[in-house]
Amino acid sequence: MLNFEVTHTEGLARRGRLTLNHGVVQTPIFMPVGTYGTVKGITPRSLDEMDAQIILGNTFHLWMRPGLDVVKQFGGLHRFEQWDKPILTDSGGFQVWSLGEMRKISEEGVKFASPVNGDRLFLTPEISMQIQTVLNSDIVMQFDECTPYETKGHRTTEAEARFSMELSRRWAQRCQAEFARLENPNALFGIVQGGMFEHLREESLAALVEMDFPGYAVGGVSVGEPKEDMLRIMAHTPQRLPAHKPRYLMGVGTPEDLVAGVAQGVDMFDCVMPTRNARNGHLFTRYGDLKIRNSRHRSDERPLDESCTCYTCQGYTRAGGSVSGGFSRAYLHHLERCGEMLAPMLATIHNLHYYLNLMREIRQALEAGGFAAFAQRFRSERQRGI
């Protein structure tokens, strides 16, 4: 089941409501990435408390471990990982792309060696749909061939990008047929490919729209291309997708990318950046980025961001109303330098809260008709520095 309603617009930017089998998602939205059935460094309870509305899982990795027999025993990912809100699963196409020389692509599918135990495996559009049906994810992504920006040191040519795009288009048809055969009650999204070539993107888009998917994603970005090329495709493709269906920009990105994407009509985002950067001491704040390992934070008593209301910055409210107080930069610096596991946990809480709160502020600005002013203020504050 999928129902999408656009409630407010400002230019190309949209405020909407996406209803799925496991709940309602307010858009625009950022989706934390939970590759192995968990968002690294944070509990489902903490995700719920910071109002994460939908998270990701990964078809490829969950197929490898724990295996479909285990997930099927629990009736799907939701009960297995104790998350009762919506889940989106990637098809495995990006992970197959990342295997490089370890995989061989054909019309039928992809042969590769398991990165877990070396077993020879074969992943096809049909098998991807079968796996995602067992996972019972609310949004299922088509199996696609992720077009690289470059291969073996040379930029992907137009001919190579066309071959990849047309293969993904044929795989989309097979995914749709298998999804229907399985009577999967969830929603299947098509993925627009075409590399860095706008006319190929338009061909891919037209074919997928003809197939009438419930939603659409823009794939093949954040694959090593220069930032200006990513922004060029982001400015080109989302606005050409059907206005009455959700639009998902895959694997993007920085806070600035999210605001820019919303301005181009994107409704859904995901990226490993807030969690991965947190594990490396790289924090996002309203006033720019902060690297907590730097010695200048050694005795700094301030929180990461005085305007932030996350547990890391502000603490929590005890029974009776008293506030526990947040953690200082000095303490977080100390944890990082000592390699304490609490460091990435607190950093992850902060970074995800920052991303989710940014999207909440964007939704509020769109409701008030003030997104353009918000975007200008956002850029000014981020450039101010901390």
Image (tube, rainbow, N blue to C red):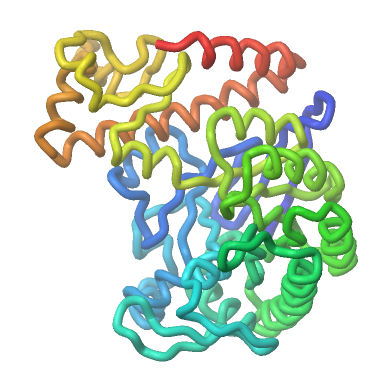
Quadrant position of the C terminus in the picture: top left
- Residue in the picture at 42% in, 23% down: 289
Residue 328 shown left or right of residue 66 in the figure: left
- Residue in the picture at 64% in, 20% down: 364
Q: Is residue 253 above or below residue 121?
A: above
- Residue in the picture at 28% in, 45% down: 41
Residue 317: x and y, percent?
25, 18
Quadrant in which residue 211 is drawn: bottom right
- Residue in the picture at 60% in, 66% down: 151
Residue 129 shown left or right of residue 43 in the figure: right
> Residue furthest toward the left?
338
Q: Is residue 307 above or below residue 97?
A: above
Quadrant position of the N terminus in the picture: bottom right
Residue 31 shown left or right of residue 283 in the figure: right
Residue 100 in view in this figure: yes
Q: Nearer the viewer, residue 203 or 184?
A: 203
Residue 202 shown left or right of residue 133 in the figure: right
Q: Is residue 369 above or below residue 204?
A: above
Residue 381: x and y, percent?
54, 11
Residue 355: x and y, percent?
49, 31
Residue 73 in view in this figure: no
Residue 97: x and y, percent?
55, 69
The mark tally for this picture is 0
Q: Is residue 238 above or below residue 383?
A: below
> Residue furthest toward the front?
153
